[in-house]
Image: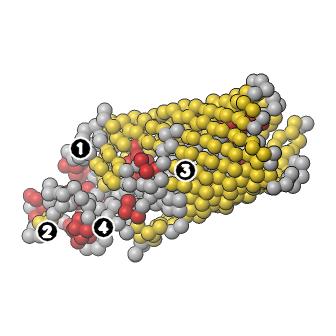
């Protein structure tokens, strides 16, 4: 089986709900952390540090257990020149479970089970962007042992290692009407019906269902240079997720024999998703004995994502499909604060600004990403349950994406030339570049704009989180 770049498959399936700084990450891995917009790299007071900065679990007394989950409700809307479309509603409920115990006065060991990425989109099967994506969902589970070692009262170091399991399902439409029209016109131009082109009734469906896994690691540092200050630093490794899956094409029954020669109804493949490395820096300062604030910077190495290369097992519909991406390195700014209202109640709030790594030239409906801001609030309270003190945290975050216009050639095909005498596209004559000439040819074939979902994208996300922790 040959490799299928899952970056292509993931790009088909996901929308703009935050891998790592952008894409499909879920950096909200604890209710208290989300209440502060995940500005927690320099904090050592919550077991979600197993994810954020493993050096931060050095606060543990004897042992602690943490259980939580984060309901996520994304909303996406497309507005074109003549049509508007909302995506179908989807909800996600990623869990997070952590446990840590002290080994001795310097060493703490912990383990976490969580889902740091795994989202999706669901669009109508006939919408104008159906040739880029109709449905997609990716799910992942990380099992992460971690250790923190206090080498000085002012310095702790930590590390974690993750085993990752993931699966993905994607669906999109293929404009088989263009292929049927072209084949008919080459044989008998008078019998060709241009109304087949970009006609949902003649579309094929592409789907892929795969699963796989990989490993990753994080190293962290926690410094306490002054009594009221903490500094945190982490490095999250690059991750290569390998998937094995089945790619399927479902064609209109009347044309299955013709289309299956170009797009086999079934073929296997191996896929690889390359997630970037990430560096986080945080500075926490105690403004008073009850009130603190933290500022974080997250740097994400997205510039390694230059292009998508797809190589299917049977080399069909072509040997290689290459799509230029040219993403840019990203940065996230986070500010969080917490205030102890009493000995048992803490209020939290946060703000974030997340830069999109996607340039205008390669922006598309597969991943309608853009810069975003987030505002969060949270409340923690220790309650007595049957004589057992349980710390309950709850938080809410609102993520608003800046409106993003798509006005480029992404989604058009390299048709190369056009037989103006017979009004037939000649797909065999291509120059390897999709440009204004291809755009004009394809627009002319449909008598308007070919359905590549050029228009404006609007997105926002509501997130809730709740957790409970118990100290032994």
**Classed neighbour count for the residue bearing mark 4: other residues with Cα under 10 Å, few (<14), some (14–19), many (≥20):** many
The tag earlier along the polypeptide, 1 or 2, is 1
Residue nearest the viewer, comparing 11 with 172: 11
* Drawn side of residue 393 relative to residue 210, left or right: right
- Badge 1 is on which residue? 319
The tag earlier along the polypeptide, 2 or 4, is 2
What distance separates the C-alpha of mark 4 from that of mark 1?
Answer: 25 Å
What distance separates the C-alpha of mark 3 from that of mark 4?
Answer: 38 Å
- Judge depth for marks 1 and 2 and give the one in front: 1
* Drawn side of residue 308 relative to residue 122, left or right: left
The tag earlier along the polypeptide, 3 or 4, is 3
User: Where residue 318 sits in the image (x, y, percent)?
Assistant: 23, 46
What distance separates the C-alpha of mark 2 from that of mark 4?
Answer: 17 Å
Asked whether the beta carbons under mark 3 and mark 4 sit within 8 Å of each other, the answer is no
Q: Which mark is residue 450?
A: 4
User: Where residue 175 sits in the image (x, y, percent)?
Assistant: 28, 58
User: Where residue 321 sits in the image (x, y, percent)?
Assistant: 28, 48
**Classed neighbour count for the residue bearing mark 1: other residues with Cα under 10 Å, few (<14), some (14–19), many (≥20):** few
- Badge 2 is on which residue? 423
The residue positioned 9% from the left and 58% from the top of the image is: 187
Q: What is the secondary structure assignment of the residue under circle 2?
A: loop
The tag earlier along the polypeptide, 2 or 3, is 3
Identify the residue at the far bottom of this view: 82
What distance separates the C-alpha of mark 3 from that of mark 1?
Answer: 36 Å
Residue nearest the viewer, comparing 461 with 291: 291
- Badge 3 is on which residue? 299
């Amino acid at each position: 089986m040959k490799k299928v770049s899952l970056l292509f498959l993931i790009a088909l399936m996901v929308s703009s709900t935050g891998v790592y700084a952008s894409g499909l990450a879920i950096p909200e891995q604890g209710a208290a952390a989300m209440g502060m917009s995940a500005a927690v790299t320099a904090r050592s007071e919550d077991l979600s540090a197993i994810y954020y900065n493993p050096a931060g679990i050095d606060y543990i007394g004897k042992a602690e257990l943490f259980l939580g989950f984060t309901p996520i409700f994304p909303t996406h809307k497309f507005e074109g020149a003549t049509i508007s479309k909302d995506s179908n509603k989807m909800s996600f409920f990623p869990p997070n479970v952590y446990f840590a115990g002290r080994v001795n006065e310097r060493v703490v060991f912990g383990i976490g089970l969580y889902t740091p990425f795994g989202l999706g989109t669901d669009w109508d099967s006939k919408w104008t962007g159906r040739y880029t994506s109709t449905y997609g969902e990716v799910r992942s589970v990380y099992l992460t042992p971690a250790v923190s070692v206090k080498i000085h009262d002012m310095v702790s170091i930590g590390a974690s290692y993750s085993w990752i399991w993931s699966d993905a399902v994607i669906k999109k439409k293929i404009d088989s009407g263009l292929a049927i029209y072209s084949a008919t016109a080459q044989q008998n131009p008078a019998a060709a019906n241009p109304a087949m082109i970009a006609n949902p009734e003649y579309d094929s469906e592409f789907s892929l269902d795969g699963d796989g896994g990989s490993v990753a690691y994080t190293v962290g540092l926690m410094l306490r240079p002054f009594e009221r200050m903490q500094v945190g630093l982490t490095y999250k490794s690059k991750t290569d997720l390998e998937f094995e899956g089945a790619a399927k094409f479902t064609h209109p029954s009347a044309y299955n024999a013709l289309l299956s020669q170009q797009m086999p109804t079934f073929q296997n493949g191996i896929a690889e998703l390359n997630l970037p490395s990430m560096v986080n820096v945080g500075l926490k300062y105690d403004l008073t004995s009850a009130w603190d604030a933290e500022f974080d910077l997250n740097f994400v190495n997205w510039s390694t994502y230059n292009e998508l290369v797809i190589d299917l097992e049977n080399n069909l519909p072509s040997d290689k499909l290459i799509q230029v991406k040219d993403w840019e390195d990203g940065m996230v700014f986070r500010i969080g604060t917490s205030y102890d209202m009493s000995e048992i109640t803490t209020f939290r709030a946060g703000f974030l600004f997340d830069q999109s790594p996607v340039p205008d030239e390669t922006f598309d409906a597969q991943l309608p990403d853009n810069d975003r801001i987030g505002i969060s609030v949270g409340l923690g309270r220790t309650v007595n349950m049957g004589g057992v003190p349980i710390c309950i945290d709850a938080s809410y975050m609102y993520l608003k994406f800046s409106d993003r216009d798509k006005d480029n050639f992404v989604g058009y095909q390299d048709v190369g030339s056009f037989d103006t005498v017979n009004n037939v596209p000649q797909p065999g004559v291509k120059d390897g570049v999709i440009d204004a000439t291809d755009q004009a040819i394809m627009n002319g074939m449909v008598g308007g704009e070919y359905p590549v979902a050029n228009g404006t994208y609007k997105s926002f996300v509501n997130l809730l989180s709740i957790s409970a922790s118990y100290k032994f």
